[in-house]
Image (tube, grey):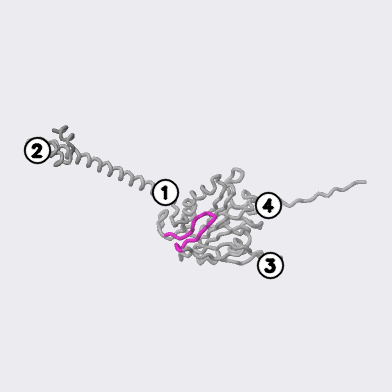
Amino acid sequence: MTQRIETDVLPPPFPDHTQLPESDGTFVKNFQEHPQSILLTDSIGPVLERIHPDGQYAIGQDCGIYWRETEPPEKGAEAPDWFYVPNVPPNLDGEIRRSYVLWREYASPLIALEFASGTGEEERDRTPLNRSADAPREKPGKFWVYEKIIKIPYYGIYEIKTGVLEVYHLLPGYLYEKLEPNERGHYHIPQLGIELGLWQGSYQNQTQLWLRWWDEQGNLLLTGAERAEVEQHRAESERVRAESERVRAESERVRADRAERSQREAIPRLLGMGLTSEQVAEALNLTVEQVREMS
């Protein structure tokens, strides 16, 4: 009797970050996007180094977060302009990340930020995934994906044209609640111990309104260049202070030398006028011993 052995046909493994497109092929929407991302990443660096001394975190800048398999693959991804994921390796198997693949990481970003060039309609799109087999497989709205699928705790939408910033916090049940800013106009991110807000200033040859970080005391988190400039000013102030102290000490020495010389010249004259050493000492605010030494 011959026994037939059936073999199970396994589905292909889910692709990883090296097998998926690193871009959806679209252009960045304005010249502020890349400097804005760099500004956020640069200034938050010392905070993340303190939180993650082991270096286990990743920052994405206009990189895809893949949350489902689709054809083409880009339809199953969203690419926030900036996002931060705690407690994941910055590289995978020694390779720089090309994208963030949710089904291989199992960890959502803590915060994602979108820099909206228009009205923010795309960034606020709550259109759900259409699961009907007969309906066309349209891509769901970005807001819905972040809220219901990727479940990002903090989602910020910055309208560059109007200077409006909205920040949402994910509640139990995966519903976004729009946050109110604090008295400084900032949004608190307690897991990081920092605040997010808007700052008017110049960065990379552009003077406009930027997204920036502050600490919980309201101090602006500086970029590396800003920290170096502050240190340069501090060193220059210290040099000026030291030079002023040297000049003051030298002036004091000259004044003391002149006073002593004047006293030495006055003592013989006063003694010659018949004053006693005690009277000369009292007149010149000296001790009798000093008068005798200088006479």
Asked if the residue at tag 3 contacts the one at tag 2, i.e. Cβ–Cβ closer than 8 Å, the answer is no
Cα separation between marks 4 and 1: 44 Å
SS state under label 2 = loop
Q: Relative to the observer, which residue lies in front, 261 or 70?
A: 261
Mark linked to residue 135: 3
Cα separation between marks 2 and 3: 119 Å
Per the image, the residue denoted by label 1 is 227
Asked if the residue at tag 3 contacts the one at tag 4, i.e. Cβ–Cβ closer than 8 Å, the answer is no
Tag 1: amino acid: Arg
**Residue at the left extreme?**
273
Cα separation between marks 1 and 3: 55 Å
Examine the structure image and report whether residue 37 is included in the region drawn in magenta.
no
Q: Which residues are magenta?
A: 183-199
Q: Quadrant of residue 280?
A: top left
Asked if the residue at tag 1 contacts the one at tag 2, i.e. Cβ–Cβ closer than 8 Å, the answer is no
Q: Tell me which residue sits at (59%, 49%) in the image.
A: 88
Examine the structure image and report whether residue 185 is included in the region drawn in magenta.
yes
Counting residues from the start of the chain, the first of labels 4 and 2 encountered is 4
Mark 4 or mark 1, whichever is nearer to me = 1
Mark linked to residue 14: 4
Tag 3: amino acid: Ala
Tag 4: amino acid: Phe
Tag 2: amino acid: Leu
Percent position (x, y) of residue 3? 89, 47
Counting residues from the start of the chain, the first of labels 4 and 1 encountered is 4
Asked if the residue at tag 3 contacts the one at tag 1, i.e. Cβ–Cβ closer than 8 Å, the answer is no
Counting residues from the start of the chain, the first of labels 2 and 1 encountered is 1
Quadrant of the drawing holding the C terminus = top left
